[in-house]
Image: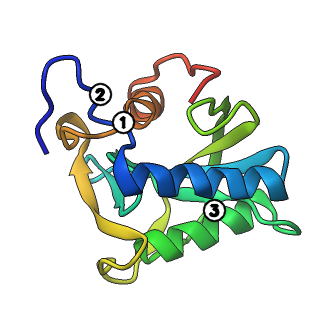
């Protein structure tokens, strides 16, 4: 995918954009305030982080998703890591920061975790939700890594001051 001058490579156009907007509208109707989790899975020995690329929104992102009714943040994180990356926690995830995600809606909040103790039970195969996934060197993230993902990596790995916004 190549972008021309002035074109936003993360713009959600066509069917993927419409599907993403409908998805968020559905959640806004069900839950006026949405809560989510994202995890930065860091392989310290390899100096790499785990990223996913969804089928319905552009760019490479950290694994994560919504916290369901009756679910704790940790339970949501564990579920999303398994669903999106075949990753199991083997230690405590570290809550690093909380963010307002106005890109999704003015009511979306994300808890950001750093995960360094984990096992991946095999590579994640592509499916209807996840187009691609994998570990990438911190210094060489894919070109279309989303700005929010780049900020979280910089905060967790390089000690940048956390932004209140995703």
Q: How far apart are the two marked residues, 2 and 3, measured between alpha carbons?
A: 29 Å
Q: Is disc 1 surrounded by few (<14), some (14 to 19) or many (20+) residues within 10 Å?
A: few
Q: How far apart are the two marked residues, 1 and 2, measured between alpha carbons?
A: 5 Å
Q: Which residue is mark 1?
A: 11
Q: Earlier in the sequence, mark 1 or mark 3?
A: 1
Question: For numbered disc 1, what is the local secondary structure?
Answer: loop
Q: Residue at x 23, y 51 (%)?
A: 136
Q: Decide: marks 1, 2 in contact (CB < 8 A)?
A: yes
Quadrant holding the C terminus: top right
Where residue 33 sits, quadrant-wise, is top right
Q: Residue at x 38, y 29 (%)?
A: 147
Q: Which residue is mark 3?
A: 77
Q: Is residue 75 left or right of residue 160?
A: right
Q: Is residue 155 placed above or below 43 in the rendered structure?
A: above
Q: Is residue 85 left or right of residue 79?
A: left
Question: For numbered disc 2, what is the local secondary structure?
Answer: loop
Pick the residue in front: 8 or 162. 8
Pick the residue in front: 149 or 20. 20
Numbered badge on residue 8 = 2
Q: How far apart are the two marked residues, 1 and 3, measured between alpha carbons?
A: 26 Å
Q: Earlier in the sequence, mark 2 or mark 3?
A: 2
């Amino acid at each position: 995918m190549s972008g021309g001058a002035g074109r936003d490579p993360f713009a959600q156009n066509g069917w993927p954009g419409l599907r993403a907007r409908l998805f968020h509208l559905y959640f806004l109707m069900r839950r006026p305030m949405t809560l989510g989790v994202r995890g930065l899975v860091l392989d310290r020995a390899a100096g790499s982080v785990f990223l996913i690329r969804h089928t319905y929104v552009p760019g490479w992102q950290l694994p994560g998703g919504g916290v369901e009714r009756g679910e704790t943040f940790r339970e949501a994180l564990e579920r999303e890591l398994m669903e999106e990356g075949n990753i199991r926690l083997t230690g405590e995830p570290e809550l690093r920061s909380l963010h307002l995600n106005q890109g999704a809606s003015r009511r979306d909040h994300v808890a950001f975790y750093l995960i360094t103790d984990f096992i991946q039970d095999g590579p994640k195969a592509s499916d209807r939700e996840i187009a691609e996934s994998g570990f990438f060197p911190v210094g060489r993230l894919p070109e279309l890594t989303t700005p929010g993902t780049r900020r979280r990596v910089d905060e967790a790995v390089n000690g940048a001051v956390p932004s209140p916004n995703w």
